[in-house]
């Protein structure tokens, strides 16, 4: 019974306060509309896997500018410089530059040749030496398929 009375009093107090009959102190805090400011960058350089990429971006108010780069599958470096603002929207300038050195390690398969052993005979037979020709296989220079994608960004307000 005491619990029901406490719940009734709580709801009655809420009803009186929401009706404006009971003064309730509410602190209202105003924040200055400061423009958004940030700067970030990252980079990855892994010679073993060929994963080489970087990005940097900065924002001052509504103006954003940045750059990212990555290695395309065809051995070129793609560099994207971009800007975004309220007046011009998003603009990107893309350029591709050939690499001066190979990035990914390429591993060619090794051809294995197997010669079956001669069967064991109960009688001693003369053994003839036979030369087995080994075929030389030419492998193309680039066997590895490498793919990269641009980083994905999303902003939430």
Image: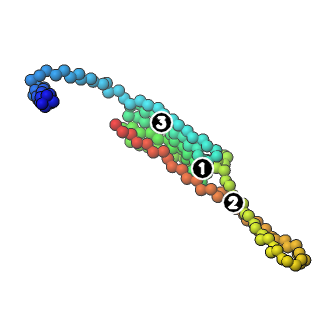
In the figure, is residue 39 to the left or right of 118?
Answer: left
**Closer to us: 87 or 123:** 123
Alpha carbon of mark 2 to alpha carbon of mark 3: how far? 42 Å
Element at label 3: strand
> Which quarter of the figure is the N terminus placed in?
top left
* Circle 2/circle 3 CB separation < 8 Å: no
Say whether residue 142 is visible. Answer: yes
| Horizontal and vertical percent position of residue 52 | 58, 44
Residue at mark 3: 57
Q: What residue did someone put label 2 on?
A: 109
Q: Which marked residue is nearer to the observer: mark 2 or mark 3? A: 2
Residue 151 point in image, percent of width and height: 48, 45
* Residue shown at 12% from the left, 28% from the top: 5
Lower sequence index among marks 1 and 3: 3
Task: Indicate whether 88 appears above or below 34.
Answer: below
Does residue 10 appear left or right of residue 156 in this picture? left
Q: Can residue 77 be seen in this view?
A: no
Eye-nearest disc, 2 or 1: 2
Question: Residue drawn 76% across and 67% down?
Answer: 114
Name the image colouring: rainbow
Q: Which residue is drawn at 51% across and 39% down?
A: 55
Write down the residue under mark 1. Answer: 76
Q: How far apart are marks 1 and 3 (CA)?
A: 22 Å
Q: Position of residue 46 (x, y in %)?
A: 61, 43
């Amino acid at each position: 019974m005491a619990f029901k009375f406490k719940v009734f009093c709580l709801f009655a107090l809420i009803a009186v306060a929401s009706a404006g009959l009971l003064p309730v102190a509410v602190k209202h805090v105003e924040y200055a509309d400061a423009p958004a400011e940030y700067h970030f960058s990252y980079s990855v350089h892994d010679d073993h896997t060929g994963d080489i990429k970087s990005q940097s971006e900065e924002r001052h108010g509504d103006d954003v500018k940045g750059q990212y780069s990555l290695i395309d599958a065809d051995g070129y470096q793609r560099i994207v410089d971009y800007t975004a603002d309220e007046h011009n929207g998003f603009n990107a300038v893309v350029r591709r530059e050939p690499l001066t050195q190979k990035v990914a390690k390429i591993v060619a398969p090794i051809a294995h040749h197997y010669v079956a052993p001669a069967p064991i005979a109960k009688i001693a037979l003369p053994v003839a030496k036979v030369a087995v020709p080994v075929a030389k296989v030419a492998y193309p220079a680039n066997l590895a398929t490498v793919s990269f994608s641009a980083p994905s960004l999303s902003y939430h307000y």
